[in-house]
Image (cartoon, helix red, strand yellow):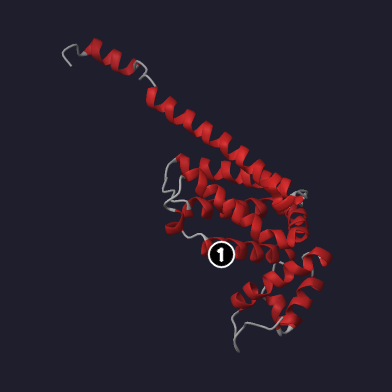
Amino acid sequence: MASTLHADPTLEEIRAALAPLIAANAAFDGFSEAALADAAARAGVDADVARLAYPGGGRDMVDAWFAGIDGAMAAQWPAEKLATRKIRERITTLVEMRIDLLAPNREALRRALALLALPTNVPFAAKLGWRAADLMWRLAGDTATDYNHYSKRAILGSVYGATMAVFLNDESEGHADTRAFLARRIDQVMRFEGWKHRRAATKVERPSLARFIGRLRYPGR
């Protein structure tokens, strides 16, 4: 594969350019020194320079690959393109786009998730999951700043993680079983969200003890 890097790339540019090549190797070598060395050779990058682009080793390689997936998803489905769809359809579209982007390197995804599942990497894995969920919600047009901002991302992160677990072992045509699972999970989430909104709309204001005592003290108010 010919290098797409210009004559004097930055480390960040090298990191981004090598990430998909490393992922292609990771099915056999994992996110390892061997995968990085081969990717660097294919891209015409000095191996020592390539190592500098991933100071955290394997987990930095996974980070860069997932960042590339985030970018490709956003490029394919920018917010203005999704705006005409219902929220349910926006989220479904974005998760399914990620499935399509990850499908060619499904074994690499298995290796990546195994690496992130190591006890020392769990906080880092949570950070990457949050980043993906946050981007999907922002592309879907979410502007919440209260606790809903966090709850929406936590719920979507859970749905996405469960969907990826199904995807890893899905041998159905076009990953139909994964897509069906995703549809069911999103339907459950939307029902719950609808229940929350209905409950909030019909909630009867509870009597306030402070107001009651205040009226006893100041009956004219």
Query: Residue 93: where, in percent of width, then height?
Result: 55, 51
Query: Residue 91: where, in percent of width, then height?
Result: 53, 48
Q: Quadrant of the C terminus?
A: top left
Farthest residue toward the front?
173
Vertical placement of 144 versus 128: above or below? above
Amino acid type at circle 1 is Gly
Q: Residue at x 69, y 63 (%)?
A: 62
Farthest residue toward the left?
220
Hey, which quadrant is residue 10 in on the image?
bottom right
Vertical placement of 57 versus 113: above or below? below
The reply, left or right, for residue 20 in relation to residue 155 is: right
Q: Residue at x 82, y 73 (%)?
A: 34
Look at the image and tell me whether residue 143 can be seen: yes
Vertical placement of 8 versus 74: above or below? below
Q: Give the labeled residue for mark 1.
A: 71
Q: Residue at x 64, y 75 (%)?
A: 17
Q: Nearer the viewer, residue 5 or 11?
A: 5
Q: Quadrant of the N terminus?
A: bottom right
Q: What is the crowding at mark 1: few (fewer than 14 residues within 10 Å), some, or many (at least 20)?
A: few
Look at the image and tell me whether residue 54 can be seen: no
Vertical placement of 140 versus 17: above or below? above
Q: Residue at x 78, y 77 (%)?
A: 38
Query: Residue 39: where, in percent of width, then height?
Result: 74, 76
For label 1, the SS is: helix
Query: Residue 154: where, in percent of width, then height?
Result: 57, 43
Q: Nearer the viewer, residue 24 or 57?
A: 24
